[in-house]
Image: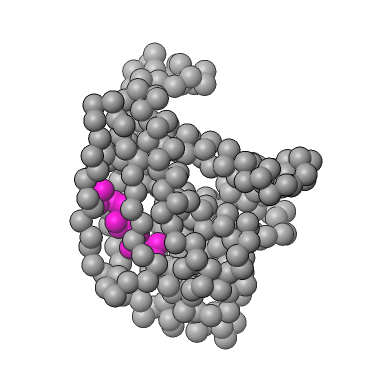
Amino acid sequence: MALLVRVLRNQTSISQWVPICSQLVSVSPTQRQWGRTLSSISQLPTTRDFPQPIEEKVGPFTKIIEAMGFTGPLRYSKWKIKIAALRMYTSCVEKTDFEEFFLRCQMPDTFNSWFLITLLHVWMCLVRMKQEGRTGKYMCRIIVHFMWEDVEQRGRVMGVNSYILKKNMALMTNNFYAAILGYDEGILSDDRGLAAALWRTFFNQKCEDPRQLELLVEYVRKQMQYLDSMNGEDLLLTGEVRWRPLVEKNPQSILKAHAPTYNDEGL
């Protein structure tokens, strides 16, 4: 937590994380227009509208081994969870329409834009899987692990110098955890709070069109609603996620998630 506080205070590059509270830093005419626009959004269910995860009861022995850094007993074997986590992360990078985000949000087609879009979808997966108790939290750790492996591999493929890559990875790690904190606060707030988090992180405080911010707030709300409708056991065993489109005719519609198929090995 101390690390996050230092990041929030000192970050001055891609994203300035100082305003932790779910408000815009100042009230300018543009931001007042944002407020009017966001207040007109049809209210989609928020995280508070869904049942909160119940902490699993564990014995003293499990608490001791987890305090020592080991993983306690899980609902499924670790290798099954790792396979599902890889599939879930893969869905964030292969089933997301990046071109649509570049176009609708007026983002340059760069590695940084790719990372911001991927980070947003990874965060939504983490929020959903944390509802699955200790097994879901373990899966979250593996998802993040696969994400950093992918980021490092992409950097090497692009020919980035190893020293520069290591330095950038450290900066991106700080940005990642600061973004997770901001998004968590935003999703637990109202649409204005979520919009503030997206404006600071996803748009790097450079969004001048309130319609882009409105579109992204609506996307996150409906996507979280969709993820919550998916069966937790299926997600733990398969990790298959289908993202709803960024723009659709009826964002209020509730799509019934298709149950994935898997065999008894979880493949």
- Asked whether 83 falls inside the magenta stretch, the response is no
Residue 14 placement, left or right of 208: right
Give the residue displayed 56% in from the left and 83% down from the top.
30
**Up-down relation of residue 166 to residue 74 (above or below):** below
Res 148 → quadrant: top right
Residue shown at the point (53%, 68%) measured from the top left: 102
Which range of residues does the magenta coloring cover?
A: 219-230
Residue 131 is at least partly visible in this image: no
Q: Is residue 85 visible?
A: yes
- Residue 256 locus on image (x, y percent): 20, 56
Q: Residue 11: percent from the left, percent from the top?
A: 70, 55
Q: Is residue 45 left or right of residue 187?
A: left
Residue 25 position in % (x across, y down) = 60, 70
Indicate the quadrant containing the C terminus: top left, top right, bottom left or bottom right.
Answer: top left
Task: Residue at 43%, 72% (x, y): give it.
Answer: 215
Residue 109 image offset from top left, x and y in percent? 60, 65
Residue 221 counted in the magenta span: yes
The residue depicted at 34 percent of the width and 49 percent of the height is: 241
| Residue 229 horizontal side relative to residue 241, left or right | left
267, 85: nearer the viewer: 267
Which residue occupies the foreground of this view, 206 or 157? 157
